[in-house]
Amino acid sequence: MSSETSPSRFAKAEGVTRRLLLQVGLGFLAMVVGTVISGTLVSAVWQTMHGSANTWPLVLAQLLGARMWVWLVLPALAYAAARVVPLKPWPTAGVAVATGELFSLSLRLIVYGFEGLYQWESLLWLVTSALGLWLTSRAIEKSRQAVAVSGARAAAKAEAAQVEYEHFKKEAARLAEKREEPPGGGS
C-alpha cells in the first residue's frame, strides 16, 4: 500500500477552479491594460497628426492599437504568469483570449449597439484573435522552457555547492585529525 493519498475530488476541483480563474483574470487584465495603452497610443498619434492631410498613421495606430491587448499584452502577461505557475499553453491561451474577446464585445455592444460591429472589423478580429492565441501559447511554452533551464542551472549549481561542501568537510576532518596528532608523530 502506498502511504501517499490521492487528492480528493474537492481538491482537484479547487485546483481546476483556481487555474480557470487565473486564465480568466489574464484575459480580463490584458484587455483592460491593452485598452489603456491603445488609447494612449492613438491619442498621441492623433495629437501629432491633427491637421495633417496624411491620416494613414492614425488609421494604422487605431487598427493595431485596438487589438494590442491580444497580440502583445496577453502574451507578455501569460509569459510572466507561466514563470510562476505551471500553465497549459493552449487551454490557457484559449480561455484568456475568449475572456478578453467577450469583454471587448460586450463593451462594444453596450457603447455602439449592433451597428458598431463592422464586417472588416470581423476579419481583423478573427485574424488578431488567432494570432493572439498562437502568440500566447508560444509565450507560455517559452516560459516553461525558461523555467526548466533555470531549474537545471539551479540543480547544477546546488550539485557543485554540494561537491564543494563535501571537499571542505573532508579537508576540515583531515586538518582536525592532523591537529590531534602529537607533534612527534605519535606514541
Image (tube, helix red, strand yellow):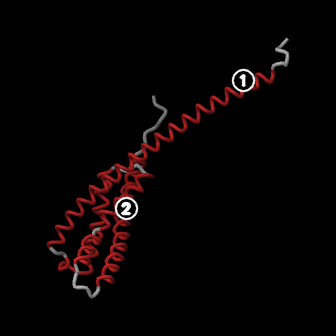
Report helix, strand or loop for mark 1. helix
Residue 163 drawn at (x, y percent): 58, 31
- Spatial distance from mark 1 to mark 2, Cα to Cα? 57 Å
Establish if 21 lies above or below 112.
above
Q: Nearer the viewer, mark 1 or mark 2?
A: 1
Number of dots carrying numbers: 2
Left or right placement of residue 60 versus residue 84 in this view: left
Residue 150 drawn at (x, y percent): 46, 44
Establish if 9 lies above or below 45.
above
Left or right placement of residue 161 versus residue 85 in this view: right
* Residue that lies at the very extreme toward the top in this rendered image: 187
Amino acid of disc 2: Leu
Q: Name the quadrant containing residue 99.
A: bottom left
Q: How crowded is mark 2: few (under 14 residues within 10 Å), some or many (20 or more)?
A: many
Q: Name the quadrant containing residue 67.
A: bottom left
Name the residue that disc number 2 marks.
26
Residue in the picture at 80% in, 24% down: 179
Residue in the picture at 36% in, 70% down: 32
Residue 48 drawn at (x, y percent): 32, 82
Amino acid of disc 1: Arg
Do labels 1 and 2 touch, CB within 8 Å? no
Left or right placement of residue 130 versus residue 179 in this view: left
Residue in the picture at 53% in, 38% down: 157
Name the residue that disc number 1 marks.
174
Establish if 4 lies above or below 146.
above
139 or 119: which is nearer to us? 139
